[in-house]
Amino acid sequence: MGEDSASHRKSGEVLPSGLGKPPSKERVRGRIGVLLAQHEELDELFLLHQEALLDRDLNRARELLQQYRVLVATHIEEERSELLPIYASFGEAPRGADVELFHSEHEKILARLVQLEHSMERLAARSPQSTRDLIAIFDGESSFKHLMEHHDLRERRFFFPALESWCADS
Ligand SMILES: [Fe+2]
Ligand SMILES: [Fe+2]
């Protein structure tokens, strides 16, 4: 409905921040491929981090988690500033795919990652680390993985297809 699209516009996040002009369709098409490939890279990076954790190689586990957070932050920033404003301009989104939901998931993901890094720091400060300490970390990371899985699905089902059909429209 028109009311919904108006509410997207009220959020003030429809226009790319700091840019007067939205990106070209050609650029968006290219970036969709890059962002989707990053989803796979991120999954792999997180698994490498968990493997290092399982091996009790805490330095490597922390380093990989930091790399992961930096890549997530860059990825989210691109979606937030370039692509979500275009998506918001399409008007009413299907149930479960509202632009605000993507923004709030992004905030949640970034906040959870800061918490995971703090947990890793606390773990590294304890020596030796007990198996139960490790289990607690894996439990926390498991809920984070679910959050990422839902977000990935939501983007694949709604966000990227909507942008792809916008790109295909001449
Ligand atoms: Fe994404
Ligand atoms: Fe995202």
Image (cartoon, grey):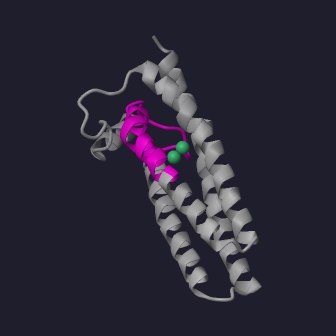
Q: Is residue 128 above or below residue 165?
A: below
Residue 76 appears left or right of 15: right
Which x, y percent locates residue 35?
54, 37
Does the magenta portion include 95?
A: yes
Q: Nearer the viewer, residue 105 or 127?
A: 127
Q: Nearer the viewer, residue 87 or 69?
A: 69
Which x, y percent locates residue 36?
59, 37
Magenta stretch prevailing secondary structure? helix
Residue 25 appears left or right of 59: left
Q: Residue at 37% of width from left, 32% of height from top? A: 89
**Quadrant for the N terminus in the image:** top left
Q: Nearer the viewer, residue 32 or 94?
A: 32
**Quadrant for the C terminus in the image:** top left
Q: Nearer the viewer, residue 108 or 62?
A: 62
Q: Is residue 59 above or below residue 17?
A: below
Residue 139 appears left or right of 118: right
Q: Residue at 65% of width from left, 57% of height from top? A: 46
- Magenta stretch: give its range: 71-99
Q: Residue at 63% of width from left, 45% of height from top? A: 41
Residue 158, quarter of picture: top right
Which x, y percent locates residue 7?
33, 44
Which x, y percent locates residue 90?
42, 30
